[in-house]
């Protein structure tokens, strides 16, 4: 294993925020999907499982906003990041829970976008990214669909195989502003520069219509693949309070603790306070989480509880 799971989960969250913040000055509407994602992470930590009713409440706050439809879809896709992290080791469970979470608003491109991004993150966490079969695996994971995303993925895969430049991709996508093109561009930026987080993000934010969403998606995938260690430290230092507030956080340490606590709960660790109460204080107890506290037990997945 090149990097620890904890470092990869940290990289996913931090990478997505950096990708978003790099493009924040270029967009008119801010993304709020990450704030919903934080609520989802807190729910997974507090309950130790996926609570559909609670997640539906989280996502309804996005659908109620008066935003362009493409931006609504981008926010929903980013809000599902925690499920990709929590169920990354089991493709069947991952797909089932993702589809269950969007069942009431199952728009084809929303469904396929969530499945695509989640699969890329899950395979990165599992260290199973195979460039030669990646697109075919994604299409298989998506399954039968009416969206144009699988066909676009195949075309972009050929562009990457030809070592064609970024300009050819933009010529292929044209000037149409839709979430499908944003997902495709985020995929291209990652797949063509897998080992370089910096370059992936800097190219992703060149998206003409949804640079913030494209940067956040590409940053999440590349962060999962390259881990926290692959993100330039100067970019960590630039995450000030204003940028962290986009996620509803006040300092960088909180984001790191979120990632660590999520991995601990996933691995079978639990905190008695969080288990015994659903109060606001209990839900925020992960901020004081210590993996070696005497109030916690650790075991392999599926031993202490089923997820």
Image (tube, rainbow, N blue to C red):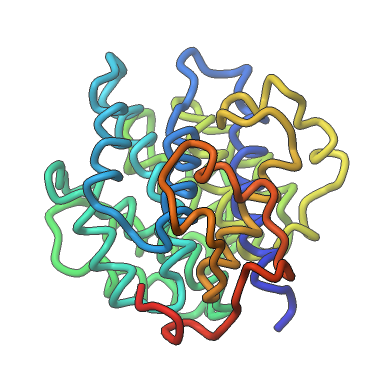
User: Which quadrant of the view contains residue 127?
Assistant: bottom right
Left or right: residue 266 compared with residue 144: right
Q: Residue at x 24, y 27 (%)?
A: 63
Asked whether the viewer can see residue 99, the reply is yes
The quadrant in which the C terminus is found is bottom left
Asked whether the viewer can see residue 184, the reply is no
User: Which quadrant of the view contains residue 133?
Assistant: bottom left
How far across and how far down the image is residue 170, in percent? 47, 40
Q: Toward the viewer: 42 or 202? A: 42
Q: Residue at x 19, y 57 (%)?
A: 100
Q: Residue at x 36, y 44 (%)?
A: 77
The answer to whether residue 11 is above or below residue 95 is above
The answer to whether residue 24 is above or below residue 247 is above
Q: Toward the viewer: 105 or 68? A: 105
Q: Residue at x 75, y 42 (%)?
A: 253
How far across and how far down the image is residue 252, in percent? 74, 38
How far across and how far down the image is residue 173, in percent? 38, 41
How far across and how far down the image is residue 294, in percent? 70, 71
The answer to whether residue 301 is above or below residue 69 is below
Q: Toward the viewer: 130 or 98? A: 98
The quadrant in which the N terminus is found is bottom right
Number of numbered labels in the structure image: 0
């Amino acid at each position: 294993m090149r990097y620890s799971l904890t470092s990869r989960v940290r990289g996913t969250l931090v990478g997505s925020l950096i990708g978003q913040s790099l493009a924040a000055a270029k967009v008119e509407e801010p993304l709020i999907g990450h704030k919903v994602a934080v609520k989802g992470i807190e729910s997974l930590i507090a309950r130790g499982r996926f609570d559909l009713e609670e997640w539906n409440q989280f996502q309804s706050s996005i659908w109620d906003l008066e935003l362009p439809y493409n931006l609504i879809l981008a926010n929903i896709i980013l809000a599902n990041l925690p499920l990709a992290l929590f169920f990354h080791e089991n493709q069947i469970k991952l797909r089932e829970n993702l589809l269950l979470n969007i069942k009431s608003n199952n728009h084809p491109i929303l469904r396929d976008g969530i499945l695509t991004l989640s699969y890329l993150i899950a395979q990165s966490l599992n260290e199973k990214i195979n460039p030669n079969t990646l697109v075919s695996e994604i299409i298989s994971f998506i399954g039968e669909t009416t969206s144009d995303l699988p066909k676009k993925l195949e075309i972009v895969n050929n562009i990457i195989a030809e070592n064609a430049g970024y300009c050819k991709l933009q010529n292929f996508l044209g000037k149409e502003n839709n979430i499908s093109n944003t997902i495709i561009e985020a995929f291209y930026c990652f797949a063509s520069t897998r080992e370089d987080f910096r370059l992936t993000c800097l190219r992703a934010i060149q998206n003409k219509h949804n640079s913030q969403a494209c940067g956040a998606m590409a940053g999440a995938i590349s962060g999962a693949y390259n881990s926290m260690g692959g993100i330039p430290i100067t970019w960590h230092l630039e995450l000030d309070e204003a940028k962290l507030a986009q996620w509803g956080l006040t300092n960088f340490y909180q984001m790191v603790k979120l990632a660590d606590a999520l991995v601990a709960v996933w691995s079978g660790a639990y905190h008695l306070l969080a288990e015994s109460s659903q109060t606001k204080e209990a839900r925020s107890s992960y901020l004081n989480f210590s993996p070696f506290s005497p109030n916690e037990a650790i075991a392999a997945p599926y031993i202490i509880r089923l997820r």
